[in-house]
Structure formats: C-alpha cells, structure tokens
Image (tube, grey):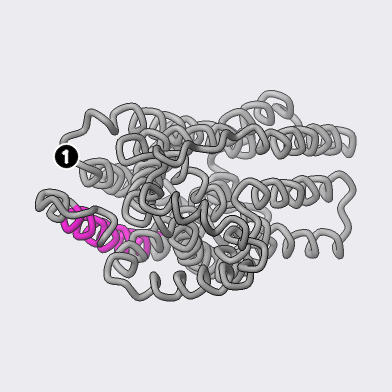
Amino acid sequence: MWRLAIIYGVFSASNLITPSVVAIVGPQISMFISGLFYSMYIAVFIQPFPWSFYTASVFIGIAAAVLWTAQGNCLTINSDEHTIGRNSGIFWALLQSSLFFGNLYIYFAWQGKTQISENDRRTVFIALTVISLVGTVLFFLIRKPDPENVLGEEESCDDQDMEAPESAQNNVTKAVDAFKKSLKLCVTKEMLLLSVTTAYTGLELTFFSGVYGTCIGAINKFGTEEKSLIGLSGIFIGIGEILGGSLFGLLSKSSRFGRNPVVLLGTLVHFVAFYLIFLNMPGDAPIAPMEGTNSIAYIRPSKEVAILCSFLLGLGDSCFNTQLLSILGFLYSEDSAPAFAVFKFVQSICAAVAFFYSNYLLLHWQLLVMVVFGFFGTISFFTVEWDAAAIVARGSDYRSI
C-alpha cells in the first residue's frame, strides 16, 4: 500500500509540469520516454532491493503523469467531434485488457501454489519487461493526423506552419503557456464540476485495484481458495472494463442522449456493487491482520457474490472513465494536454488519499465515502453535459465552454 501511495503522490505532483513537457517534446516522444521508465520499473521486480524499489516508484510516478497527459493529447488530436467517444471507448478497452489477460495467466499458472518460487517470479517479470519494451517501441507507429481532421486544430494549422521555423526558440514559451493554461483550467466552472467526478474515479480506482482484493484475501470463510479468488476477481474486473469500453465506444455514435445515460448506468452499477459488498464482507476485512478475519457481515461470505461485485466494479469504472475522456477531449480540444493533466492530477491525489485511509478505515466507512462522492460526482457531470448540449443547440462552438 505504501508503494502505491508513493507512486500516486508523486504522480499527482508531477501532473503540474506534464503539459509543459508534452508541449516541448510532443506526445509521441513523451509516451516513448515514459514507456522506458515503465519498463525499468517492471525490471526492478526481477531482482528487487529496497532502494531500487522505492526509487523506481518515484520515477514511475513521474513517468505515469507524462504518459497519461500525452495519451490524452494523442487521443484528442487523432479524433474529431464524431469519433472522440468511439476512440475513448476503444482506448479504455485496450488499456484494461491487461487486467484480464494478466490475471488470467496468474490464475492458471499459479493455481494451487501456496508459495511463489524465485524462478516463477522472475519468469513473469522478465516476460512483462519484454512486452513493455515492445509496446514502448510501437508508440512510433502511431500515425500523425491530417490537420483538417484534427479536433480543435482547424483554425490553427496555418498559424502552426508559419511558426514552425521559430519552434526551437519558443520551447520555453510553450512550456510556460502550457503551465499557465493548466492553472487557468483548474478554476473554470466546468473543470471544477468535472473534478468532483474525477475525484470519485480516484477513490474507486484505489478501492477496486487495491482494497477489494485485500478484502477477498482476508476472509477466512472462503477457505483455501481465498488467495486464488484475488486473481479471479481481477479477471472479472477486467471483463467489466473491456465490455464497458467496447460497448460504449461502439454505441457512442448512435447515442442521441449524450454521455449522461452512461454515467448514470455507472453510478447505479457501482451503488449495487457497494451494497452487495457491504452485505457480503465484514467491516474489518481491509485492516485484517496477516492471519485474516473470521468475522461475518450480514450474510455468509459468498464467493459468487464477491466475483459478481468485481465485474460490477469494472463495468462501472469503464462507464465513468470513458465518458470523462470523451467530454474532456470534446470540451478542451485545443488545450487537451493541460485538461488531461488536471484530470489526472485530481484523480491521482484522491487515489493517494484513499490508499492512505484504506489502512485505517473499516470497510463500511470506505463504501460510504465513495457513495457520497459518487452521487455528487454524477450530478456534477450531468451539469457540465447539459450546459454543453445547450450551447450546441444554440449553434455555438462546443469548445467555447
């Protein structure tokens, strides 16, 4: 938990400078360099030492901030107002496929093992390092968009051509301007409202990626399968994420009702999951000792309910994140790097806070915090989407919000 708290703490602080980095070197180089740091971080686990472990955690926090900002910028410039929803869904489904395939391998390869050998651990992390390096190199195959098809770039392409010879000497100006834009975006009405929704995604990210698996593994009533259930839970979280990303990406062009129904679905799905978790898991599960807990909640712990909740957590998360990516790319098409930096800044701060309090709060209090933020985050998102739709109906530029 402390490793993740370090990563997300550095991640949130680094988002303040990432728009400047992307503005200077561009999204493609930013993603490539960040990918190298990701590969380095994975390689540390081949033969971990405390000093390399925590040092790599700091570097991966910085790299993650640059990578997410660059990815958001790349997604936006390769989309237009008709494809941003579809592309956001496809991106999210591909991103979360790692949850499914990674956990699927671990579930079958390590099934029945009570201890993981050094050879097994090294094999996994060597393979992951190689896969990460291959993926990093593939960043160079991303196509460069046609200026006339780029969301938010129509008006500025001629100016960019005139400024090209001066680009080298304007790097400092670009960096400063990107930083200023990030600060200005932080206090706009739309970004403040979306920050409530983003804060919720940070809290529930910590819950399903760290806390929920810990809870499953701590319940002794699950018997000898409690540890393997953690991997199975990750598989079903991944299935929910992939299904949601694919479905909402494909339906984005045919939806006449905007993004609000998808966010509402995510809220309902998550609230059902939280209620089932509240009934199924004892309150001391997140803070149970290494020996686990024999406590029982309101019903006898059910493996089937636990796995169903994993699927619902993944599906609900995809609802929120695909629509946030879509609306940010739509609203801030001309300032996508600063917008995505603010998005990840808020999300990572809340994730770091959640990782901290998850070591101390009982399960029902953690669920209550998420319910409150989920409710107000949904209302905030609805407000922004309604305002945006009203401006479009009046024939104004959506990006002028």
**In the picture, residue 83 is in which quadrant?**
top left
- Whole-percent x, y for residue 231 in the image: 61, 35
- Whole-percent x, y for residue 198 in the image: 39, 60
Q: Residues within 10 Å of mark 1 (few under 14, many from 20)?
A: few
Residue, x 42% and y 55% (percent of image)? 201
Locate residue 214 relative to residue 240 in the image: left or right: right
Q: Quadrant of the N terminus?
A: bottom right
The reply to whether the magenta stretch includes residue 250 is: no
Q: Quadrant of the C terminus?
A: bottom left
Residue, x 44% and y 54% (percent of image)? 204
> Farthest residue in the left direction?
394
Q: Nearer the viewer, residue 111 or 2?
A: 2
Residue, x 61% and y 28% (percent of image)? 101
Please name the residue that numbered disc 1 is placed on. Answer: 257
The region drawn magenta spans 367-388
- Whole-percent x, y for residue 300 in the image: 41, 42
- Whole-percent x, y for residue 109 in the image: 73, 25
Helix, strand or loop under label 1 = loop
Q: Is residue 34 above or below residue 10?
A: above
Locate residue 116 relative to residue 336 in the image: left or right: right
Q: Nearer the viewer, residue 376 or 361?
A: 376
The reply to whether the magenta stretch includes residue 373 is: yes
Q: Nearer the viewer, residue 353 or 349?
A: 349
* Predominant SS of the magenta segment: helix
Q: Nearer the viewer, residue 218 or 384?
A: 384
Residue 38 showing in the rendered view: yes
Residue, x 37% and y 50% (percent of image)? 152
Locate residue 242 relative to residue 176 in the image: left or right: left
